[in-house]
Image (tube, grey):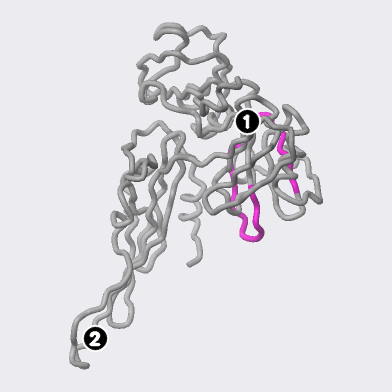
């Protein structure tokens, strides 16, 4: 089934954390959320027409989607009739809690009907973490994530993370059409993603991420970092950004309608943060990843604060979101 512009919009939708979402825990301990429809009136059902609803996930979560199919066939009456035969999965809820349908198609089959759905939930983001060893890199790729070991981190508490997922993602700047050559340097002949990462780390503070395809390495040095990605029709690309992994930006006091504060709820010295203008929450998160220092972010509309001191408190302010950088203890203990 060919993708339409509507589905591309879903794939490239920028994730935000300004809308509330239900958070819960599965039986195997993987935290997830029910996605929020960007257009609350969107109806994904259609007969023979391709339509999709855009979703958003809270900060720290990425869309986890799965296709399902269901069909029913019934013998024609003039052949004597008989019981109908069904196969497949009909409802997104059968995949487990948290899945919502964002794309549905219905049609007729010989003697029956068929349905297909794109089911999505918001799953905790996968991240790539790096140790502080100075030994040679080695990379192992699985369907869910790539784990890089033995890579010099180049900064305590920093690491690598995918942009948009591990499969066929090309790096972009401000939007999925922003591929300015001024954002990166090309290093042909890199034998692996790990080699490309190593070249980037040698750039020191200029290393904001990499785009790798077979034999070609782009080292990104855009000051604002990598804000977006594209899914090329041809080729197999990997886009990863380096810095303070956005997965570890966690809500402070639920995060929603909270403004960040220093030691107490009224401690809001303007020397605690650097203000940037952004387009979306995800842009603010990407700013944190690329920043020399980031203890967290405060986001409201187009305003993004990158906090350069620890966030110990928050204050209730309508429309604001406060997220604090909370890396695993094995990384934070090095800061």
SS class, disc 1: strand
Residue 44 x %, y %: 34, 56
- Answer with mark 2 or mark 1, whichever residue precedes in sequence: 2
The label on residue 132 is none
Q: Which residue is mark 1?
A: 243
The C terminus lies in which quarter of the figure?
A: top right
Q: Is residue 224 magenta?
A: yes
Instruction: In this rendered view, identify the residue nearer to me: 97 or 7.
Output: 97
Is the residue 185 above or below the residue 271 in the image? below
Q: Nearer the viewer, residue 12 or 51?
A: 12
- Name the image quarter holding residue 164: top right
Q: Secondary structure at mark 2?
A: loop
Residue at 33 percent across and 72 percent down: it is 107
Q: Which residue is drawn at the image coordinates 24% and 86% (left, top)?
A: 75
Q: Is residue 237 left or right of residue 101?
A: right
* Badge 2: residue crowd in 10 Å (few <14, some 14–19, many ≥20): some
**Residue 127 as seen in the image, left or right of residue 98:** right
Q: Nearer the viewer, residue 159 or 228?
A: 159
Residue occupying the point 42% across, 24% down: 321
Q: Where, by quadrant of the figure, is residue 239 drawn? A: top right
| Residue under pointer 2 | 75
* Main secondary structure along the magenta-highlighted residues: loop
Can you tell which quarter of the image residue 317 is in?
top left
Residue 211 falls left or right of residue 272: right
* Real-space CA distance between mark 2 and mark 1, rounded to the nearest whole angstrom: 60 Å
Q: Is residue 244 inside the magenta stretch?
A: no
Give x and y (percent) for residue 36.
36, 42
Which residues are the magenta region? Answer: 217-238
| Residue 168 rendering spot, x and y as whole percentages | 60, 54
Image coordinates of residue 64 in percent, x first then y, are 44, 49
């Amino acid at each position: 089934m060919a993708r339409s512009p509507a589905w591309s919009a879903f794939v490239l939708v920028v994730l935000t954390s300004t809308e509330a979402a239900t958070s819960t825990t599965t039986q195997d301990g993987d935290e997830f959320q029910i996605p929020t429809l960007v257009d609350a009136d969107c109806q994904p059902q259609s007969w023979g027409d391709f339509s999709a609803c855009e979703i958003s996930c809270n900060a720290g979560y990425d869309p986890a989607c799965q296709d399902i199919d269901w069909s029913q066939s019934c013998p024609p009456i003039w052949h004597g009739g008989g019981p109908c035969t069904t196969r497949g999965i009909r409802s997104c809820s059968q995949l487990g809690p948290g899945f919502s349908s964002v794309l549905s198609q219905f049609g007729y089959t010989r003697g029956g009907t068929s349905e297909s759905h794109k089911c999505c939930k918001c799953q905790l983001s996968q991240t790539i973490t790096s140790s502080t060893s100075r030994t040679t890199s080695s990379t192992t790729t699985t369907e869910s994530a790539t784990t890089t070991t033995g890579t010099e981190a180049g900064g305590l508490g920093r690491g690598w993370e995918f942009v948009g997922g591990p499969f066929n993602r090309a790096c972009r700047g401000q939007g999925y059409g922003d591929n300015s050559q001024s954002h990166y340097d090309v290093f042909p002949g890199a034998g692996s993603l790990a080699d490309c990462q190593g070249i980037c780390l040698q750039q020191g503070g200029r290393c904001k991420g990499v785009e790798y395809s077979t034999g070609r390495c782009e080292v990104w040095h855009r000051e604002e970092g990598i804000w977006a990605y594209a899914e090329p029709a041809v080729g197999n690309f990997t886009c990863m950004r380096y810095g303070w992994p956005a997965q570890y930006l966690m809500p402070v006091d639920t995060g929603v309608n909270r403004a960040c504060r220093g030691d107490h709820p009224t401690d809001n010295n303007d020397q605690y943060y650097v203000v940037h203008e952004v387009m979306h929450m995800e842009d603010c998160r990407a700013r944190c990843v690329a920043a020399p220092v980031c203890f967290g972010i405060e986001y409201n509309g187009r305003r993004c604060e990158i906090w350069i001191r620890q966030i110990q408190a928050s204050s209730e302010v309508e429309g604001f979101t406060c997220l604090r950088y909370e890396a695993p203890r094995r990384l934070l203990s090095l800061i």
